[in-house]
Image (cartoon, rainbow, N blue to C red):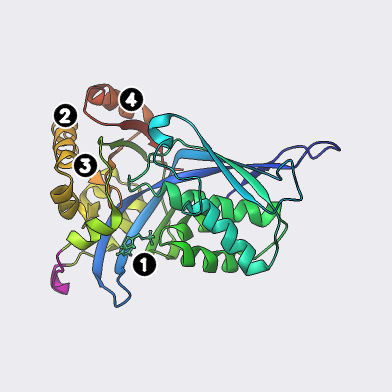
Amino acid sequence: MPKARLSANQPGLREVLTVRSRAKVNVFLEVLGKRTDGYHELDTVMLRTELHDVLQLEFPEDVRSDEVRLTVIGDRRLTSAIPCDESNLIIKAARALRAATGIHQPVSITLQKRIPAQAGLAGGSSNAAAALCALNRLWKTNLPQRSLHEIAAGLGSDINFFVEDCRAARCTGRGETVKPIALCGSPVVIVMRPQSGNSTPRVFSELASLPSSELRSSDEILAALKSGSLSQIRRAAFNRLTNAAVRLNPEMGEMLQAVQRRTGLPVLMSGSGSTCFVVVENVRRGRRLLSVLRNIDCSFLCLTRIH
Ligand code: C5P
């Protein structure tokens, strides 16, 4: 479960939990087929990044209320698309934990947003996992990780990766079956999101099905991550959703090509996009490449470590 910082609980002070909610990138994503429940069967490899939101959770002033309250703060360009109502996955996670345990404690949550939305970085899913694990402490419900995984799977497909709290994992099923994997070193990625985001359901529905003989295996990327060989990682990195996403978001396609031209490196889309990223050796080389990309047309650009 993600680490939490519990601030001093002296008399007169309310208990406050502060947790990080990290983003992910998919260094490999193959779609194995469409399922009868409408989801797609995936084989994907996710890496957790240092890029993170911060959640602060505390009992509200009026502890008699049984409210779950959410406030979002941060740069307006990042926060304007984030709902604070029941449609937010943080509120859904809190309600699901209550339903599973029968408790009715209140909570006031402040989300400091740094991860862009509609980006394929799983910001919302990560927030849900962070809230679920932190509330399990704050409310002293003490559910085991297995039960948190069950709740997470009921809320979405990417949440289990963050509940697992590992640097890297192979995720299968619709994404909710998480197996941590070996990762040598701490690769660095440059992530950039064009002005427009992508809708995950639309990208999946744009995808044409393929004969199984054309599907790629994750074996090569798993071996590359284990060995830490950057050239092997770049060779094996792949995302089946890219062409479908480029058809829906040509601006993202243009950004992808421009970054490829300027860096001379393969550029990968994360999840269903619209964030794309390149993997680099270290922070120094990353900073040099960042300067080449400074004036590229995008809404978000950052260098972050796999962590
Ligand atoms: O599970 P989550 O809410 O993140 O999924 C959002 C949407 O993305 C789903 O409603 C579905 O349309 C699509 N999806 C899919 N197959 C997956 C994961 C997501 O078709 N494995």
In what element is the residue under mark 3? Answer: loop
Q: Earlier in the sequence, mark 3 or mark 2?
A: 2
Q: Does the magenta stretch include residue 209?
A: yes
Residue tagged 3: 267
User: Which disc number belongs to residue 262?
Assistant: 2
Q: Are marks 2 and 1 in contact (CB under 8 Å)?
A: no
Q: Identify residue type, mark 2.
A: Arg
Residue span colored magenta: 208-214
In what element is the residue under mark 2? Answer: helix
The residues bearing labels 2 and 1 have C-alpha atoms spaced at a distance of 34 Å
Q: Residues within 10 Å of mark 1 (few under 14, many from 20)?
A: many
Q: How crowded is mark 4: few (under 14 residues within 10 Å), some or many (20 or more)?
A: some
User: Which disc number belongs to residue 287?
Assistant: 4
Determine whether 264 is above or below 133 in the image: above
Examine the rendering and report whether any part of residue 149 can be seen. yes
Q: How crowded is mark 2: few (under 14 residues within 10 Å), some or many (20 or more)?
A: few
The residues bearing labels 3 and 4 have C-alpha atoms spaced at a distance of 17 Å
Determine whether 171 is above or below 258 in the image: below
Q: Earlier in the sequence, mark 4 or mark 2?
A: 2
User: Which disc number belongs to residue 9?
Assistant: none
Farthest-out residue, bottom: 36
Please tell me which residue is depicted at 69% across the width and 62% down the height of the picture: 142
Q: Earlier in the sequence, mark 1 or mark 3?
A: 1
